[in-house]
Amino acid sequence: MPENRYNLEIESDPNNLITVEEFVNYFAKDLGVGDERMNGLLLSVTEATTNAIIHGNKCNLNKKVTIDVVAENNEIKIKVKDEGTGFDPGKVPDPTEPQNLLKDSGRGVYLMKVYMDDLKYNVTPEGTETILILKIKE
């Protein structure tokens, strides 16, 4: 029987993204995430973590990014929390608009919305939490 809770805490260093990828592969396989959803899950969690490291914590090695995973009721809820001041998701430019098509960045939030069944944000005094929801079958 697989676990239903998983946790990872990393320093705010982009080099730690390989650890995040290994963590996602571990819990996703443990929870039986199919190949058809795996790439989107991996992309979404690494995008959320990249945003937390770079935009939230400004690559400050003294600040941590925490990833909490809970699997219950046929869904996986992944919370990626930074120690930053937060942002307004409504102000993130739409990468599908013509003026944004050739930009090097700015697609992470869009891709998380595409691949996840739900995407939420919780801004607290302690940091911003990106909440990714992926529905799974029994």
Image: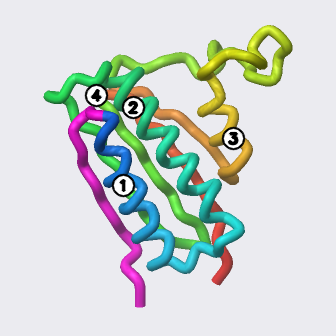
Look at the numbered discs 4 and 3 and tell me whether their residues touch, using CB distance below 8 Å: no
- In the picture shown, does residue 98 fall above or below 121? above
Label 3 amino acid?
Lys
- In the picture shown, does residue 35 fall above or below 78? below
Q: Mark 2 sits on what residue? A: 52
> What residue is shown at x 33% (from left), y 33% (from top)?
82
Q: Decide which of tag 4 and tag 3 comes sooner along the chain.
A: 4
Quarter of the figure with residue 54 = top left
- Element under label 3? helix
Q: Mark 4 sits on what residue? A: 83
> What residue is shown at x 49% (from left), y 48% (from top)?
45
Label 2 amino acid?
Ala
Q: Is residue 9 magenta?
A: yes
Q: Mark 3 sits on what residue? A: 113
How many marks the image carries: the answer is: 4
Q: Give whichever of 73, 30 is nearer the camera.
A: 30
- Element under label 4? loop
- Could you tell me residue 60's position as x and y percent? 22, 23
- In the picture shown, does residue 83 fall above or below 31? above
Q: Is residue 122 left or right of residue 120?
A: left
- In the picture shown, does residue 132 fall above or below 96? below
Label 4 amino acid?
Glu
Q: Mark 1 sits on what residue? A: 68
Look at the numbered discs 1 and 3 and tell me whether their residues touch, using CB distance below 8 Å: no
- Element under label 2? helix
Q: Decide which of tag 4 and tag 1 comes sooner along the chain.
A: 1
Q: Decide which of tag 3 and tag 2 comes sooner along the chain.
A: 2
- Element under label 1? strand
Q: Give whichever of 95, 123 is nearer the camera.
A: 95
